[in-house]
Image (cartoon, rainbow, N blue to C red):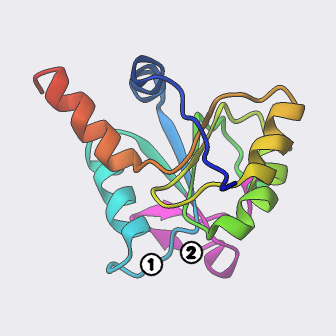
Amino acid sequence: MTYHFINPSQPIIDHYLKNAQTIAIVGLSDRTDTAAYRVAAYLKEVGYTIIPINPKLAGSEILEEKAYAKLQDVPIHIDIVDVFRRSEFLADVAQDFLETDADIFWAQLGLESQEAENILTKANRTAIVMNKCLKIEHANLAKRDGK
């Protein structure tokens, strides 16, 4: 049987988006042709504070924001951790997530991992969204809200 993550209801996802201010983007690079870059640029444009997470680019700036090597290095509270790493790396990111006080673990469209879900739920961190694009979800919410 194939694993398929069951996301929270739309009202809960909308609540996450409306209440978040800071979004760490794991796997964000300075390559403007990537989905992660386009999503990050959109999120910044609509008012979120974005935090690039990329060990190869730590200390540099992406979209005028300082990049960090890992989630644990970020000195401020993270509302959403948006992950742009292949599914096989989601469990590793989930472990890093547990070492922070971040609120919501979000894996981008096409990404899901039963191991990551198990790691998070075992630690009572149940604010999890997988296989959904933050940009698409935000744009749909804005449309529903008439913005």
Q: Quadrant of residue 76?
A: top right
Q: Is residue 21 left or right of residue 54?
A: left
| Residue matched to label 1 | 30
* Residue 108 in the image, given as x and y percentages of width and height: 49, 55
Q: Which residues are magenta?
A: 52-71
- Mark 2 or mark 1, which has the lower sequence index? 1
* Residue in the foreground of this view, choosing between 7 and 34: 7
Magenta includes 86? no
Residue 69 visible in this rendered orientation of the protein: no
Residue found 48% across the figure and 29% down from its top: 20
* Residue 22 in the image, given as x and y percentages of width and height: 51, 38
Q: Does dot 2 land on a helix, a strand or a loop?
A: loop
The amino acid beneath tag 1 is Asp
The amino acid beneath tag 2 is Ser
Numbered tag placed on residue 60 in the rendering: 2
Residue found 32% across the figure and 65% down from its top: 38
* Residue 36 in the image, given as x and y percentages of width and height: 43, 66
Labels 2 & 1 near each other (Cβ < 8 A)? yes
Q: Quadrant of residue 90?
A: bottom right
* Residue 109 in the image, given as x and y percentages of width and height: 45, 56
Compared to 91, does 6 lie above or below?
Answer: above
Badge 1 density bin: few <14, some 14–19, many ≥20, Cα 10 Å: some
* Residue in the foreground of this view, choosing between 83 and 77: 83
Residue found 84% across the figure and 51% down from its top: 95
Q: Does dot 1 land on a helix, a strand or a loop?
A: loop
